[in-house]
Amino acid sequence: MTERVQYEKLARLLPELYSAQTLDSFPRHVIGLLPRLISADSCGFNETNFSRRRFESFATPSLGARVPDADETLARLMHHHPMVLHNRNTDQRALKMSDLLSQRQFHRLELYDVVYWPARVEYLMTGGFEVSAAGDIVTLAFGRETMDFTEDERDLLNQLRPHLQQAYANAEAMTTVRSELECREQALEEAVNSAVVVVHNLTIKHASSSAIRWLSSFFRDDLEPNHKLPDLLLRWVRFWQTSADGKQSGVRPCSPLTVESEGARLNIRMLTTRRPDEVLLLLSREVGQDSPESLRQLGLSRREAEVLFWIAKGKTSRETAAILSITRKTVDKHVERIHRKLGVETRTAAAAIAWSAMRDS
């Protein structure tokens, strides 16, 4: 392999290497890229700390399938691994097992019997860098069954090492920044008991951990950024966006959406931004407050209780319809039945009975 070819392979790989965002995703990210640089039957990303006797390994699926307990075994035998011992006192330059041992000597090791032979690894090459003065070492490991690694491949790994170290440092810095932001975000949310969700084209563009947790709990969906909104919330946002665009006349400013779940209430307000395809959702959670469920004691159905609850909150039929995702005509029919069941003629009287029931519950 010529130097030009080596350089081109590495140059094509580097932009993706530096795209890793966090330390949690970094090992898998790197393992996915390595086969494009050096051909091998298996690849691994290892983190070793001698003082704490800690060894963590992330390997290609094939290795894990052949040796399920490889991590534990390598951790137990790390102080007997020839390459680990050699790297402990070096700058982690690329090293082949054949630099240290013959094939016969390699086959005599317990490591070979319990890890490398079941994994069908006859030839090894590693290279990495020291993470800190505390003794953490990061190494990439390549394994083959039938052919040793060449000097060109050793050179490629050595060329990759400084970039790998810098990409790791970048991911570490990004992880620290994200952690600090999450802590500040969490402190702010706890102070005001609210959270913000950024919605772009009816998809969650950004949401704090509390917001995702609240939405998942109240809507019974597994949610995360880049996922669509839950169906009820999506229809509510779409309704008010359409109203704001002037496609429906006579609609008042956006009324909050309230969702009940297991004695708690999630209030959601929508705020528009300068971008027509983007809105902010302001979430606040209440626990142990009045709820539609407490109105069932009045002999109302679940839907009738929900309608009366919002009437008591001062909502119009149109606003109640938007909150419950039903038509205004359906709301008015529920109101008629509520009046008959409660023996009243006006919404004000029904609301007074509702407040009394919620206060006593």
Image (cartoon, rainbow, N blue to C red):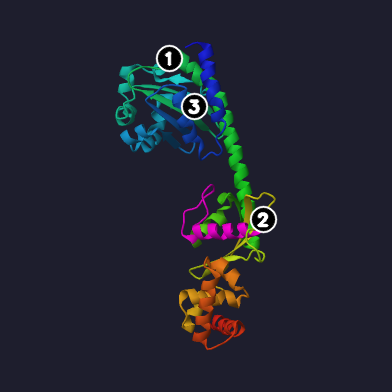
**Mark toward the start of the polypeptide (1 vs 2):** 1
Report the amino acid beneath label 3: Arg
Tell me the magenta residue range. 219-244
Residue 340, percent from left and from top: 50, 86
Residue 283, percent from left and from top: 60, 60
Label placed on residue 17: none
| Residue linked to disc 3 | 88
Report the amino acid beneath label 1: Thr
Q: Quadrant of residue 187?
A: bottom right
Residue at x 68% of width, y 52% of height: 273
Between residues 147 and 202, which one lies in front from this camera angle? Answer: 202
Mark-to-mark CA distance, 1 and 3? 23 Å
Please determine whether, in this image, residue 222 is positioned above or below residue 27.
below
Q: Secondary structure at mark 3?
A: helix
Residue at x 50% of width, y 31% of height: 138
The residue lying furthest to the right in this view is: 274
Residue at x 29% of width, y 30% of height: 118
Please determine whether, in this image, residue 225 is positioned above or below residue 18.
below
Label placed on residue 150: 1
Q: Secondary structure at mark 1?
A: loop
**Mark toward the start of the polypeptide (3 vs 2):** 3
Q: Quadrant of residue 84?
A: top left
Report the amino acid beneath label 2: Thr
Residue 96 magenta: no
